[in-house]
Image: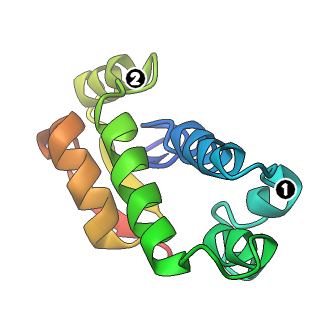
Amino acid sequence: MIKALLFDFDGLILDTETPEVLVWQSIYHEHGFELPVDEWEKTIGGYGLSNFDAAEHLSLLSQRRLDPVSMHTRYRRESDLLIQASSIMPGVINMIEQAREQGIQSAIGSSSPHSWVDTHAEKTWHFSLFQAYYLSG
């Protein structure tokens, strides 16, 4: 018997990865370079799969004319705006409501930092839908 459902935050509740890659691609194109998406993808949800840093990489490509700290700040600001404008992925609320009707509790799971998930969760939907919060990272 199912007693609880664990919903992954990034990619299941919200599509956070598409806005992030789009912002990096835009920043790279603005400076005449292509984001190596195959390397960037290795950083998604995988702690330890890659130490690729898009800002540091672009700084190296630009022969250090671009500051990685400034690029990280810009990336975070722009991607956060896109994520905050996003809707919850289709079917998530319905599934949570169906689970609640059947006495099944729901929880958020994420390997992302708690503060990051909180920021987006509070601005895009309600924590009250969930009975628990689980971080695996």
Measured as percent of width and height from the top left, residue 8 is found at 49, 49
Question: Label 2 sits on what residue type?
Answer: Met
The residue that appears at 32% across and 23% down in the rendered structure is 93
- Give SS at disc 1: loop
The residue that appears at 45% across and 25% down in the rendered structure is 89
- Give SS at disc 2: helix
**Circle 2 sits on which residue?**
95
- Image-quadrant location for residue 88: top left
Colour scheme in the image? Answer: rainbow
Measured as percent of width and height from the top left, residue 66 is found at 59, 73
The residue that appears at 39% across and 47% down in the rendered structure is 78
Who is closer to the viewer here, 27 or 137?
27
Measured as percent of width and height from the top left, residue 112 is found at 46, 67
The residue that appears at 39% across and 67% down in the rendered structure is 73
Residue 113 sits above or below residue 125 on the image: below
Mark 2 packing: few (<14 Cα in 10 Å), some, or many (20+)?
Answer: few
**Circle 1 sits on which residue?**
36
Task: Judge whether residue 129 can be spotted in this image.
Answer: no
Tell me the number on the disc at residue 58. none
Mark 1 packing: few (<14 Cα in 10 Å), some, or many (20+)?
Answer: some
Distance from disc 2 to disc 1, alpha carbons, whole Å, reads 36 Å
Who is closer to the viewer here, 16 or 33?
33
Question: Label 1 sits on what residue type?
Answer: Pro
Who is closer to the viewer here, 57 or 64?
64
Closer to the camera: disc 2 or disc 1? 1
In-image side of 57 versus 121 (left or right): right
Measured as percent of width and height from the top left, residue 1 is found at 49, 41
Task: Judge whether residue 108 can be spotted in this image.
Answer: yes
Who is closer to the viewer here, 65 or 69?
65
In-image side of 3 versus 31 (left or right): left
In-image side of 84 versus 67 (left or right): left
